[in-house]
Amino acid sequence: MLELPSLRPETRYGLPTADLFLFNRQYVVGYSFLFRQPRWAMQLIDDQTKDMEDDFDRLDNFREDLRIPEKFRSTLEDYRGSGYDRGHLINSADKRNSKIINSETFLLSNMSPQKPNFNRKIWLDLEKAVRTLSEKDQYHEVYSICGPLFKIGDKIEVIGANNVVVPDAYFKSILAERAKPKATGQLEMWSFIIPNHKADNKQLKDFLVPTVDVEKHAGLQIWDRLKGEKSDRLKNRKNRMWSTR
């Protein structure tokens, strides 16, 4: 049987379950038919993905993903007038190697309904912080996975004719591989759970959680190819936040 995690570098440390896997040029999505949005999105940031080939502004060419069966797909009309942003899970600013790579981040299979004061503030801050982390010399590769969270049993809110479910919160988990000679191959891990609303002047460090908490809330196994006691310790501790200066 073919082992899917071996197909792409992004999935080196794990590939959570999903209804449909969508392999893009520089990121992978695990799509949820029920929620009409990604269950998670995963990327790797390294020297190759940070190379800049084209000079252009973000393309903003939001569109349906025709790889998804129409009955499970979200559309532009679902978001129109909803009061929610088409919130990127993989940020377009992370994918500027070429126009086609940037364009892929505007597929609706990479979008989730986010409150504007969440999407444009605390979520944006976290995206920038991960990008800053990836630029630090002490890290060779930075992996991230993020996705929506839903409170089981609570009344749900949906938008549009396709009933796109509005998440209660979002998670992001970051795995960084150290590059300095004496620490090469050593891993660090940070995970966050942030409610889908204004952060009320809180800082990113206020939303740090053990990775096992993300797994429990999301119903997913994160970085599941990591094995052993050291890996368990990584998942069970709440790491300190990195400096973004």
Image (cartoon, rainbow, N blue to C red):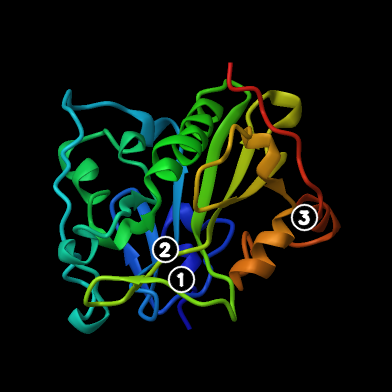
Q: Is residue 116 above or below residue 97?
A: below
Going 18% across and 28% down the picture, which residue do you hit?
57
Q: Secondary structure at mark 3?
A: helix
Up/down of 67 relative to 122, above or below: below
Residue type at numbered disc 2:
Leu
The secondary structure type at the circle numbered 2 is loop
Amino acid under disc 1: Leu
Residue placed under numbered mark 1 in the picture: 4
Q: Nearer the viewer, mark 3 or mark 2?
A: 3
Q: Which image quarter: residue 182?
A: top right
Q: Residue furthest top?
A: 245
The count of marks equals 3
Rendered image quadrant of residue 21: bottom left
Image disc number at residue 18: none
Q: Identify the residue at horizontal 59%, vertical 32% (top origin).
A: 201
Residue beneath the point at 40% across and 79% down: 19
Which image quarter holds the C terminus?
top right
Element at badge 1? helix
Residue position for label 2? 7
From where the camera sits, is residue 240 visible?
Answer: yes
Dots 3, 2 in contact, CB < 8 A: no
Q: Are marks 2 and 1 in contact (CB under 8 Å)?
A: yes
Q: Point out residue 166 in the picture as x, y percentages from the top left corner.
A: 41, 66
Instruction: Give coordinates of residue 137: x percent, y percent.
Output: 58, 20
Measure the alpha-carbon separation of dots 3 and 1: 21 Å
Question: Which amino acid, mark 3?
Answer: Ser
Within 10 Å of disc 2 (Cα), the crowding (few <14, some 14-19, many 20+) is: few
Q: Nearer the viewer, residue 59 or 118?
A: 118
Question: Which residue is denoted by mark 3 in the rendering?
Answer: 231
Let me know if residue 226 appears in the view. no
